[in-house]
Amino acid sequence: MPALLEMRGISKSYGSVRANRRVDLTVQPGQIVGLLGENGSGKSTLMKVLFGMVRPDEGGIVYNGRELDTGSPRAALQAGIAMIHQHLTLVDAMTVSENLMLGWSEGGSRWLDHAAMARKVRDAAARYGLEIDPEARVEQLALGEKQRVEILKAILRGAHLLILDEPTSILSPPEIERLLEFLRRFRADGHSVVFITHKLGEVLAVADEVVVLRDGQVAGTAPAAGATRESLARMMVGRETAAPQVRGNAAAGKVRLQVQSLAARDAGGALRLKDASFELRAGEVLALAGIDGNGQGELADTLAGLGAPSGGRILLDGVDITQGRAAQRLAAGIAYIPADRAGTSLVQGMSIEDNLLLRDIARAPYSSGGRIDRAAARRMALQRMQDFDVRAASPDAPARTLSGGNQQKVALARELGRGPDVVIAFQPTWGLDPGATRFVIDSLLKLRDEGAAILYISSELEEVLAIGDRMGVLSDGRIVLLTDRTDADLERIGLAMAGAMAQQEAA
Ligand SMILES: Nc1ncnc2c1ncn2[C@@H]1O[C@H](COP(=O)(O)OP(=O)(O)OP(=O)(O)O)[C@@H](O)[C@H]1O
Ligand SMILES: [Mg+2]
């Protein structure tokens, strides 16, 4: 059978950065290709070239036996290629159907009436397990549902090749399962997929073929059957990966943060965080496992001062800060690492250096007599870029030109590099490759050893077990389990998380 897609000798540079270097990629009909690589290795760039958003400096694309016009998303769409971006592109104020119809007319096909569209949505949704209410307004949908709408849009346009750039980083475990199941059904219909992820387990679960990029080049290609996490990790970094650092024990000190019966509503007014109580001490990590939608976001935001709680109290060193604003908490030494780096953490048009300086702009040694000391700022930026392995041409590079994972590293470098003494980390490893993930965990443990109090909220059980001195599970707005590392019972934690999943499935 002839290949569905042949990308040949694709090269693309941004100034001195060679994002893709003579990359070849072949995709067969009915094949799922997993595209792996460290942060900044060129995965998104290659897929933007395929989808016509970026014109390659060299190389060509043959799709379905025909030369594809490079640099034209319209040509790609018409050929039957669709891309689901990491940052979704729906119009919030419109309904699901209206959004889908928008896509329709752009695709150049016949105009469809509302009823016909609603019928098509329901048919495709049932066939692929992508249930969604066609009349729902997009702004009311959760991230996972918005992604489902984007996928439906691609299917309705008749896509044969679906490109997904880190689709699972915004999903909860049951949603990830559903997405993988959809990919299998899509493949069973003879269609093809290129799937980018940092979760090696997902690749092994669903891909037929794995392609690994390193420094913009293909480092290896292998059938997924027979590959292991270790073999894939080795291909990604080009050497054996070091064993995780041995974590020392915590020497917990005085109580820093007291959270008492905290409750909070989401943006739509629903009570998500119902009754959370815990204490956080200096020199310990409290890791809360749980699945988004069980009050995680509301807990993190209220602790960071970004939203007002609807009940309960927060005390810092015995002082009531329940009504305090974010700026006050920052001044008190609380750092917040949100999951959504691009949306809330970085100013996209600003340089790396200025993003790193953001919180300290009015402080010595970066400012004196109302002037910014550029030399001091540059030293700080270079040091933090080195410490956090931010890969970019220079501190002057605008944040938006960084790869997804490198943006997250800048956000982390800013918050953790200042040596905070209380850290609220909400899914801090979002979008990071395995090496960078371990680096984040090691950095937080180092801060802990220096006396910081750290709250770590994550849906990754592995991470919770790796980092927590104490562990808990947040389920349906309540902390349902709180245990010391020494008595941690994996099975109980797993079961409590599963309870949370069942809640979410039911909702
Ligand atoms: N618009 C741009 N301007 C300048 N440099 C860019 C631009 N887009 C990407 N780059 C650079 O190209 C390289 C590859 O980036 P790319 O986004 O393809 O990486 P990636 O493999 O998707 O990484 P991640 O896993 O972090 O998402 C990076 O060094 C990045 O900084
Ligand atoms: Mg990327």
Image (cartoon, rainbow, N blue to C red):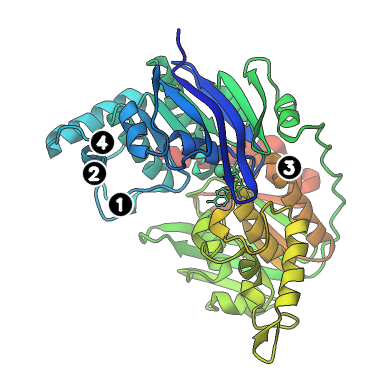
Q: Is residue 212 above or below residue 403?
A: above
Residue that extends furthest to the bottom in the rendered view of this protein: 369
Determine which residue is flagged by label 4.
107
Res 499 visible: no
Q: Amino acid at mark 2?
A: Leu
Mark 2 is surrounded, within 10 Å at the Cα level, by few (under 14), some (14 to 19) or many (20 or more) other residues, namely: some
Relative image position of residue 265 (x, y in whole percent): 43, 62
**CA distance for labels 2 and 4:** 9 Å
Report the front residue among 423 and 5.
5
Q: Earlier in the sequence, mark 2 or mark 3?
A: 2
Determine which residue is flagged by label 1.
91
Per the image, label 1 sits on a secondary structure element best described as loop
Determine which residue is flagged by label 3.
435
Mark 1 is surrounded, within 10 Å at the Cα level, by few (under 14), some (14 to 19) or many (20 or more) other residues, namely: some
**CA distance for labels 3 and 4:** 40 Å
Q: Is residue 215 above or below residue 267?
A: above
Residue that extends furthest to the top in the rendered view of this protein: 1
Q: Earlier in the sequence, mark 2 or mark 1?
A: 1
Q: Earlier in the sequence, mark 1 or mark 3?
A: 1
Marks 2,1: beta carbons within 8 A: yes
Q: Amino acid at mark 1?
A: Val
**CA distance for labels 4 and 1:** 17 Å
Determine which residue is flagged by label 2.
102
Q: Amino acid at mark 4?
A: Gly
Q: Is residue 300 left or right of residue 493?
A: left
Marks 2,3: beta carbons within 8 A: no
